[in-house]
Amino acid sequence: MDRLLGAASYQGSPPLWLVSEGLVVAVVGTALVVGAGGLVVLGGLSPIRSTALIAVAVAAVVLYLLITRAGHALVAGIAILGAVLAPAVSRLAAELVLCGAGRTQDVVVTAVAYEPAVNPAYACTVRLQDGAPVQPRLRRGCGPSVVPGDLIAMVYDPAGRVAPRGLAGPGTLVRAAAEAVFLVLVFATVCFLAVVRSYRVPSTGSAQPRG
């Protein structure tokens, strides 16, 4: 059980130095992962570099926790949460960029694909009204009622940091923010618990910081 959840066996509260370390790791670790997720969008990185950056940030947090003898189950949970948190931050950053600097224009639908395994299931291939193709396909604003030749709204970033998307519906930004904030809180909390539980504190409270 110690290996899974950490060696902590408290008769009272953990010492202040251990709580402080937990808070620092939670803040710094969360900042690393959130920063990686945001930089993916703001830096306009390629998918391969984006994945690599996020992996390095999550691995740095996981490695530190393993060095501090944190419980393996908590470390595994942090790795999973980090892999989910960074993309959520990227989605929020993309929505913020499009909301703040995005431009909207109508595009012509050239084909509609139905992909039941994906949500949203409908994807529209579109082109600009001057005939230039648009990549990638748009899912927002596409649906069963849309047919080739229809016009749908597209929002794009003039700086090219974010791929064009269909116009967001009401509450899209709020949902993205709520998801990211929830994951940030969970990730930081689990990081804190992993550190605090990584050290066995004697009942006398005489534990000393790691040397």
Image: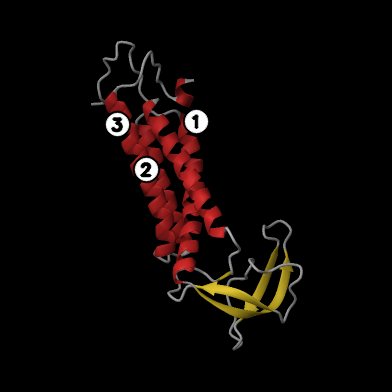
Q: Nearer the viewer, mark 3 or mark 2?
A: 3
Q: From mark 1 to mark 2, how far is it between C-alphas? A: 17 Å
Q: Which circle marks residue 73 in the picture?
A: 1
Seen from this angle, which residue lies furthest left? 211
Q: Residue at x 68, y 58 (%)?
A: 118
User: From the viewer's perspective, is 103 left or right of 12?
Assistant: right
Q: Is residue 19 left or right of residue 155?
A: left
| Cα gap from disc 3 to disc 2, whole angstroms | 14 Å
Q: Which residue is mark 3?
A: 20
For the image, the number of numbered tags is: 3
Labels 1, 2: front one: 2
Residue at horizontal 45 percent and vertical 21 percent from the top = 2
Q: Earlier in the sequence, mark 3 or mark 2?
A: 3
Q: Do residues under tags 3 and 2 come within 8 Å of each other at their CB atoms?
A: no
Pinpoint residue 139: horizontal percent, then vertical percent: 64, 66
- The three-letter code of the residue at mark 2 reads Gly
Q: Between disc 1 and disc 2, whose residue precedes? A: 2
Mark 3 lies on a secondary structure that is helix
Look at mark 2 in the image and give the residue it sits on: 29
Identity, as a three-letter code, of the amino acid under mark 1? Ala
